[in-house]
Amino acid sequence: MRFFDASAVVKRYVRERESTAVRRLLRAGDVAVSRLSEIEVVSALARLEREAAISRPQRNRAIAAFTTDLAAWHVVELSPDVVATARTLLVRHVLRAGDAIQLASAHVLRTALGQDLEALVAYDQRVLTAAHAEQFTVVGN
């Protein structure tokens, strides 16, 4: 199973340099995301529309596609374990709150599975640096 940070998921719905690689990874096996991604991905798509990087119809199609995809993915809920782990990660690494929740979600998932994840996919350097330090196999820039 691969865990996808919101920074990676957004690339599934907009054309960016890494979009092809993200789409390939999403098709290649089981996908897990944090419940926070449901908010962060829509936020990113709305921002792109406000900045005129995508049109309103593109934004709406992307949100609809994301909602459909989300129903097929494993979603790590914002549980007390995720929150406690995020708090620890915030002290241990240079992370923003949302990034800590994303990484904590991957931590909790890894523990629940009782095995390493195939990869943590992200395109946020802070998340990648912290994930590497937390012994995750990382994919991203």
Image: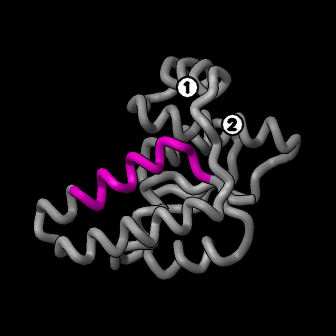
> Residue at horizontal 61%, vertical 44%?
132
**Kind of residue indicated by mark 1:** Ala
Tell me residue 14's x, y (percent): 34, 74
Quick check: marks 1 and 2 in contact, CB under 8 Å? no
| Farthest-out residue, right | 114
Q: Residues within 10 Å of mark 1 (few under 14, many from 20)?
A: many
Q: Secondary structure at mark 1?
A: helix
Direction from residue 71 to residue 51 in the image, left or right: left
Tell me residue 68's x, y (percent): 52, 68
Report the residue marked by disc 1.
Answer: 86
Q: Is residue 54 visible?
A: no
Report the residue marked by disc 2.
Answer: 107
**Kind of residue indicated by mark 2:** His
Q: Residues within 10 Å of mark 2 (few under 14, many from 20)?
A: many
**Residue 41 inside the magenta-drawn segment:** yes
Which quarter of the rendered picture does the N terminus lie within?
A: bottom right
First in residue order: circle 1 vs circle 2: 1
Q: Which residues are magenta?
A: 33-46
Q: Is residue 17 shown above or below 69?
A: below
